[in-house]
């Protein structure tokens, strides 16, 4: 069994000083001057391949991979009483690492915003903080092809007496709360409006979270939104709100692991491990252990 290494860094400045990445060595191999151009190219290709093979990580000489995770989001990812990362995501990472002997995962804590900056500047190798996809992120970061967690979302209203009980009840101008421009709910409602040109809803972008949005629902400035059904009870308890999900699931937003754009080999190996864990039922097992239910299957993708 691998031994796991934990690195704690609460601000990006600490992460920037983190070292230990496996560097690529160099090799010089000069072709004979009497060789043809084709022979020289073949020699150069062979030299590059040999150098790559020599520097490829192995079980005997594993490459350390620094991954940003959350430290205070129980049960997703947090630091336990023993001072080590635990929760659904860290335990999943440990299971992935066991399947990849050529890598040794190390973990660090960075805010979501700083994690993306750290990825762009090669200060970390990967980030696992329940990242959902959007077009802008796809341009800047490398996503796993395999998702590992999904957020099934329902149409959500405020109070028990709303006339809105399904998408069929939406009318032109219905005031919809969009939590963030470019987010999964924004994409859903933009698509909805494109498909309903004669009955488009009004998209109202409100930042500041529930403390700002709840009064707007109470006074009628907002009428509906999408919410993860399993989070509604917790939100109502925390804020004293009266959100209610209605109808069937209308969308799902999946979570992926993010990498630097040049980490194709690492991403592909992690994909292989994730696919194996899904096939063996390990992902489902971890989800049930930490969340009480299996939230690893996107019902829209797996139909």
Image (tube, rainbow, N blue to C red):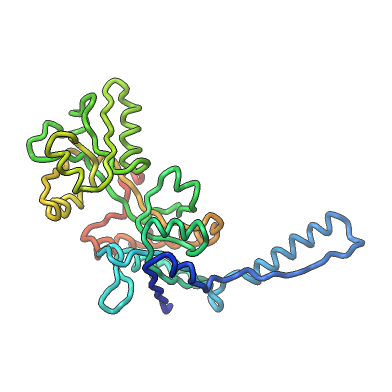
Q: Position of residue 254 (x, y in %)?
A: 35, 49
* As drawn, 213 above or below 201: below
Q: Can residue 259 be seen from the camera position used here? A: yes
Q: Which of the pair 288/153 is nearer the observer?
A: 153
Q: Could you tell whether 275 is left or right of 47 in the image? A: left
Number of marks in the rendered image: 0
Q: Can residue 272 be seen from the camera position used here? A: no
Q: Which of the pair 272/201 is nearer the observer?
A: 201
- Say which quarter of the image contains residue 197: top left
Q: Position of residue 213 (x, y in %)?
A: 20, 43
- Say which quarter of the image contains residue 48: bottom right
Q: Which of the pair 146/228 is nearer the observer?
A: 228
Q: Position of residue 27 (x, y in %)?
A: 73, 70
- In the displayed image of the protein, which residue is found farthest to the front? 13
- In the displayed image of the protein, which residue is found farthest to the left? 161
- In the displayed image of the protein, which residue is found farthest to the top? 198
* As drawn, 44 above or below 299: below
* On-image quarter of the N terminus: bottom left
Residue depicted at x 22% and y 58%: 293
Residue depicted at x 29% and y 50%: 151
Q: Position of residue 181 (x, y in %)?
A: 35, 41
* On-image quarter of the C terminus: top left
Residue depicted at x 17% and y 52%: 235
Q: Which of the pair 5/246 is nearer the observer?
A: 5
Residue depicted at x 13% and y 40%: 158
Q: Could you tell whether 8 is left or right of 259 in the image? A: left
Q: Could you tell whether 224 is left or right of 36 in the image? A: left
């Amino acid at each position: 069994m691998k031994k796991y290494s934990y690195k704690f860094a609460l601000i990006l400045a600490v992460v920037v000083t983190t070292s230990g990445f496996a560097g690529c060595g160099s090799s010089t191999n000069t072709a004979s001057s009497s060789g043809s151009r084709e022979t020289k190219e073949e020699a150069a290709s062979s030299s590059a391949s040999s150098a790559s093979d020599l520097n490829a990580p192995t079980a005997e000489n594993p490459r350390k991979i620094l991954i940003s995770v959350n430290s205070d989001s129980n049960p997703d990812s947090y630091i336990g009483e023993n001072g080590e990362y635990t929760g659904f995501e860290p335990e999943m990472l440990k299971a992935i690492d066991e399947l990849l002997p050529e890598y040794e995962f190390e973990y660090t804590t960075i805010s979501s915003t700083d994690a993306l900056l750290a990825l762009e500047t090669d200060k970390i190798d990967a980030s696992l903080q329940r990242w959902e996809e959007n077009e802008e992120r796809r341009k800047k970061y490398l996503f796993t092809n395999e998702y590992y967690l999904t957020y099934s979302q329902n149409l959500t209203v405020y109070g028990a007496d709303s006339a809105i009980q399904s998408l069929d009840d939406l009318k032109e101008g219905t005031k919809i709360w969009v939590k963030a421009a470019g987010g999964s709910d924004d994409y859903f409602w933009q698509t909805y409006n494109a498909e309903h040109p004669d009955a488009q809803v009004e998209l109202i972008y409100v930042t500041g979270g529930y403390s700002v949005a709840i009064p707007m629902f109470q006074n009628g400035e907002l009428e509906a939104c999408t919410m993860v059904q399993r989070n509604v009870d917790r939100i109502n308890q925390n804020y004293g709100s009266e959100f209610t999900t209605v109808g069937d699931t209308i969308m799902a937003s999946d979570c992926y692991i993010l990498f630097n754009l040049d980490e194709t080999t690492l991403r592909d190996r992690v994909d292989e491990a994730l696919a194996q864990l899904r096939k063996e039922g390990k992902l489902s097992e971890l989800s049930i252990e930490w969340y009480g239910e299996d939230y690893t299957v996107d019902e829209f993708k797996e139909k």
